Amino acid sequence: MKQAEKKIIEANLDKEYAGITGVPNFTKAALKLAYGADSAPLSEDRIAVTQTISGTGALRIGGAFLERHYPGAKAIYIPTPSWANHNAVFKDSGLKVEKYRYYNKDTIGLDFDGMVADIKAMPKGSIILLHACAHNPTGVDPTEDQWVKIADAVKAGDHFPFFDMAYQGFASGDTNKDAFALRHFIKEGLYPVLCQSFAKNMVSIAPLKVLLLLTSISGSLRRACWCLLRRLRIGG
C-alpha cells in the first residue's frame, strides 16, 4: 500500500472534477478486475458502468434502477442473514425485501440445500441478491461446485442476479478466485447487476470508490442502460 501511495503521489495526478459516471480510466481498470481480461461482455462493450460513493451508494442506485426499469416484480430476495444495510437501502429504493435461507447456525456453515430450495421456490423472474465472496456477516461462502448449482437454479427460474462484491481478494487472497461466481453466472448467459466496492481491499489508494455495473445483451442495450444510469445519477 505504501508503494502504491508513493506511485500516486509521484504521478502528480490532477484534481479535476470527475464526470457524472466517474473517471473513465478507473472504471475501465475496475471492469477488468471484476470481469476478467478475457470477459466477452467486456471485450464486446456490453457493460454499463457508473462510479458511486461507497457501497451503500451503489446499492441505492442499483435498487432505484431496478425499481424504475425492471419489468418483473419490484422485490429483491436477500440472504438470511445479510449485511444490515441491505434491507434498509433496498426498501428506500422502493423494492420489497424478501428473504432466502443461507446460514445454518447448527453447522456454522452454508445451508446449501435450503438456499437452493428457496431459489427454486421464488416466483419466476425474481431479483436475487448474492454476496460474490466473503459473505457479510458470516464469512461463509459457497464452494465453486455449489456456485455452479446455484447458477443453475437462478437460470432455471429466469431470475435476475444482483451481486454485491465488497471483498474481492479478501476471501481467498486471489482476486480471480473471488470473482468466480460473477464470471460463472455470465458464462451461463445471465446478465447480472454488480456493486463492486474498493472501500476494504484498496482503502488506502481508492477510498470510497465503488462501481455499479450492468451486464447487457448487446452494445446498444448497454448504451441505453448507461443513459438511464446517468439520468438517475443527476436526479432525472
Image (cartoon, rainbow, N blue to C red):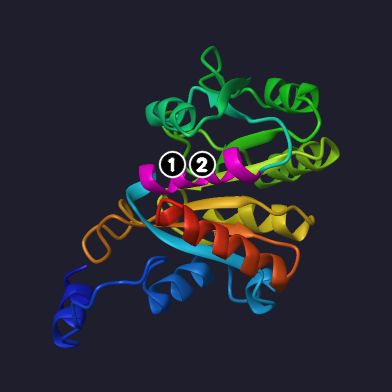
The image position of residue 77, as x and y in percent, is 61, 28
Disc 1 crowd rating (10 Å Cα; few below 14, some 14-19, many 20+) is many
- Which of these two is toward me, 119 or 54? 54
Q: Which residue is drawn at 70% across and 73% down?
A: 219
Asked whether 218 falls inside the magenta stretch, the response is no
Of circles 2 and 1, which is in front?
Answer: 2
Q: Residue at x 20, y 83 (%)?
A: 13
Badge number at residue 60: 1
Give the CA separation, mark 2 to mark 1: 6 Å
Is there CB contact under 8 Å for labels 2 and 1? yes
- Which of these two is toward me, 91 or 3? 91
The image position of residue 60, as x and y in percent, is 44, 41
Residue 70 occupies quadrant = top right
Q: Is residue 232 above or below residue 87?
A: below
The image position of residue 128, as x and y in percent, is 64, 35
Q: Is residue 119 above or below residue 45?
A: above
Apparent side of residue 206 relative to residue 97 in the rendered image (left or right): left
